Image (spheres, grey):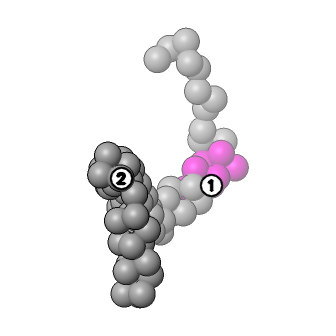
């Protein structure tokens, strides 16, 4: 984000009453925390994507070779 955008946000928040400013800050904290979690999830998923693709290929091969059996949820 450019410093101009940050300054615009600051001016917008400063124009609010103190109680409203606190609400905005709390919402922003929660929103930023959610964004950070999403970014971490995406990074972790990208790291493991090759392994997930390989596991899916192995599963398909086992199914095609008749080595796989259907999952019986009653036996779990």
Q: Foreground: 18 or 23?
A: 18
Report the Cα–Cα distance between label 2 and label 1. 63 Å
Choose the circle earlier in sequence order: 2 or 1: 2
Q: Is residue 41 visible?
A: no
Which range is magenta? 58-65
In magenta segment, residue 45: no
Label 2: which secondary element: loop
- Depicted 21 relative to depicted 51: above or below: above
Residue matched to label 2: 17
Q: Quadrant of residue 32?
A: bottom left
Q: Where, by quadrant of the figure, is residue 38 drawn?
A: bottom left
Q: Where 73 sits versus 65, above or below?
A: above
Locate residue 42, reporting x and y percent.
44, 64
Q: Is residue 61 magenta?
A: yes
Find out whether the residues at labels 2 and 1 contact each other: C-beta distance under 8 Å. no
Local secondary structure at mark 1: helix
Using the image as rendered, state which of residue 47 and residue 50 is in the foreground.
47
Question: Left or right of 39: which side holds 69?
Answer: right
Q: Quadrant of the N terminus?
A: bottom left
Residue 12 in percent (x, y) is at 43, 68
Q: Residue at x 49, y 59 (%)?
A: 52
Say which residue appears at 43% left-offset and 78% top-offset. Answer: 8
Instruction: Residue at 39%, 57% (x, y): give it.
Output: 16
Q: Residues within 10 Å of mark 1 (few under 14, many from 20)?
A: few
Q: Position of residue 48 (x, y in %)?
A: 41, 64
Characterize the local packing of mark 2: few (<14), some (14-19) or many (20 or more) Cα atoms within 10 angstroms: few
The disc placed on residue 61 is: 1
Q: Nearer the viewer, residue 16 or 2?
A: 16
Circle 2 or circle 1, nearest the eye: 2
Report the side of 17 relative to 61 (left or right): left
- Residue 45 in the image: state x and y as whole percent: 44, 62
Vertical relation: 62 (above or below) 70: below
């Amino acid at each position: 984000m450019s410093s101009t955008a940050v300054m615009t946000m600051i001016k917008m928040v400063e124009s609010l009453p103190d109680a409203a400013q606190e609400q905005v800050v709390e919402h922003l904290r929660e929103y930023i925390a959610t964004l950070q979690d999403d970014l971490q999830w995406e990074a972790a998923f990208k790291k493991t994507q090759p392994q997930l693709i390989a596991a899916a290929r192995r599963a398909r091969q086992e199914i095609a070779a008749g080595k796989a059996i259907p999952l019986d949820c009653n036996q779990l």
